[in-house]
Amino acid sequence: MRNLWYKNAVIYCVDVDSFRDSDGDGIGDFRGLTDSLDHIEALGATCIWLLPFYPSPDRDNGYDISDYYNVDPRYGTLGDFVEFMRAAADRGLRVIVDLVVNHTSVDHPWFRASAGDPASKYRDWYVWRKDKPKDADKGVIFPGVQKSTWTRDPRRKEYYFHRFYEHQADLNIANPEVREEIERIMGFWLELGVSGFRIDAAPFVLEDLAKLEDGTDPHAYLAELQGFLSWRRAEAMLLAEANITMDEADEYFGSGDRLHVIFNFPLNQKLFLALARGDGEPVRAQLKALPALPAVGQWATFLRNHDEIDLGRLAEDERQEVFDAFGPDKSMQLYERGIRRRLAPMLGGDERRIAMAFSLMLSLPGTPVIWYGDEIGMGENMDLPERHPVRTPMQWSADGHGGFSTAAPKDWIRAPVLDGPFGPLFVNAQGQKTDETSLLSTVQRLIRVRRACREIGWGEMEVLDLGVSSVVALRFEWRGGVVVVLNNLADAPVTLDLGAVVGPAHARNLLRREADLRPDASGACALRLSAHGFEWLRLQG
Ligand code: NOJ
């Protein structure tokens, strides 16, 4: 069971450069993060996912790495990283890190050698062609920003492939030396104590292997990676960023020997459609379509992350509905498919609704992942380019422009949200910590209850039909325990009859002190949910 810790984990995602600055240079760092572990521990998270913190020219928020074996000097030293790992472990917090090996920065010495030195051993580490392929304008990930997937390098006088920006050259994973290096990178960070990796752009990592014509299944490489982990650190897990369809799940999870966890992107898109409509049906339908997973497999569920909300899997009219509700202004939309906003402003700053969104996310089957700042309802800075609006500095307190750094805000890594209803005066961690009615306190309570409901992380889920479409009602069962979670997406109260759900048993309210719910003599068991209300119940007896 210990090795399956991720099944009942709560993951908190941190971008070191915008979390807390300890030395007053305006850039968040490992010492600042170490000093802020109280917040993460008190929230109830059990694992921290660090966005890339490696040396990087930082043209894609660190997803353009120039050295896999170090910490970017702006964030501290390897020594600071080790101190942070020790402090996190002291609090029982695990740490996973981003493994970005689909590509490197073009500033990486490997790429420079591959492009500029014909005798280099890195010659074949990237994907090169003498001529520009005819389909070079196909498959761009950032339309409107990125024009092609092939760019000419003047040194080599050839074209290199880049699935993402042209400054991110794709590694040639088909080259066994590259695969060996990837294991060396993983081995390095495992030695420093990490509990696993978030594999960036997983489907694209497999792309080169798919082109090999030797009959190997590219997904088998995932088993190779898991095999490596199991030798080096058996409890380490692989969490993949893979926006896959449910039909592809088998290939990615294998029989439990490939990936452990995959972000459930399709469910996330349906969740926002459901929130936009105030109707649970899109979520219910998606949940019913979930394939069975191997016992060690798990979904990762989330509301927001550091990227845009990707709505690419919704039908066009559905996507338009979500745009209309949450990103009506063109400036809020991105790459023709997404919304570059934070959760709280999308939901109009309505705390009941934000809390319900958390309750819903935390009660979906899988391991919840929380984007820093969403737990206090932070807003976005729409003046920042591309995906940066949601990456503003953490708002710690009402004073000092939010307490992220002692430097003047103009020198901060990213321009913060300073004014308005989402500015630090109204939205900050310190103020919410001592206020029992704050969003932070509600999210803390929900996380505490979620962790105690191991049925959700481990058990069997059933989508309940209570005849009220705005309510997502889920029942989880594991080892004899039964938990029922009810979330009302509508802006109007509803009354449910839980008679058939509670049956001869009675139901204990897990969030509030209330008398147990018991069916009356006729078998009916009425429960009222307020507008955007939610209840977590445990069946007793
Ligand atoms: C996915 C990451 O989440 C995103 O931020 C990044 O730009 C791309 N992968 C490329 O690494």
Image: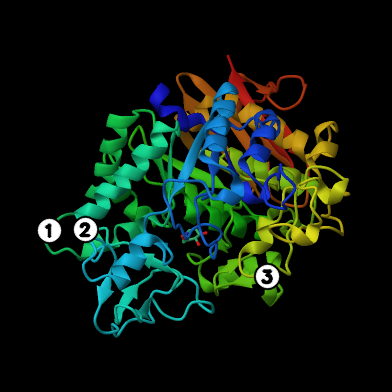
Question: Residue 438 location, x and y as percent?
Answer: 82, 38
Q: Nearer the viewer, residue 120 or 484?
A: 120
Q: Nearer the viewer, residue 391 or 475?
A: 391
- Mark positioned earlier in the residue sequence (2 or 1): 2
The residue under the point 42% across, 22% down is: 2
Q: CA distance from mark 2 to mark 1?
A: 16 Å
Location of residue 539 with respect to 313 vertically, above or below? above
Q: Residues within 10 Å of mark 1 (few under 14, many from 20)?
A: few
- Is the residue 36 above or below the residue 414 in the image? above
x and y, in percent, of residue 215 in the image: 12, 58
Q: Is residue 308 among the parts visible in the rendering?
A: yes
Q: Position of residue 274 (x, y in %)?
A: 61, 56
Amino acid residing under circle 2: Asn
Total marks in image: 3
Foreground residue among 157 and 284: 157
Is residue 301 found left or right of 108 in the rendered image? Answer: right
**Where residue 332 is drawn, which disc sits there?**
3
The label on residue 215 is 1
Amino acid on which the number 1 mark rests in the picture: Gly
Q: Disc 2 designates what residue?
A: 175
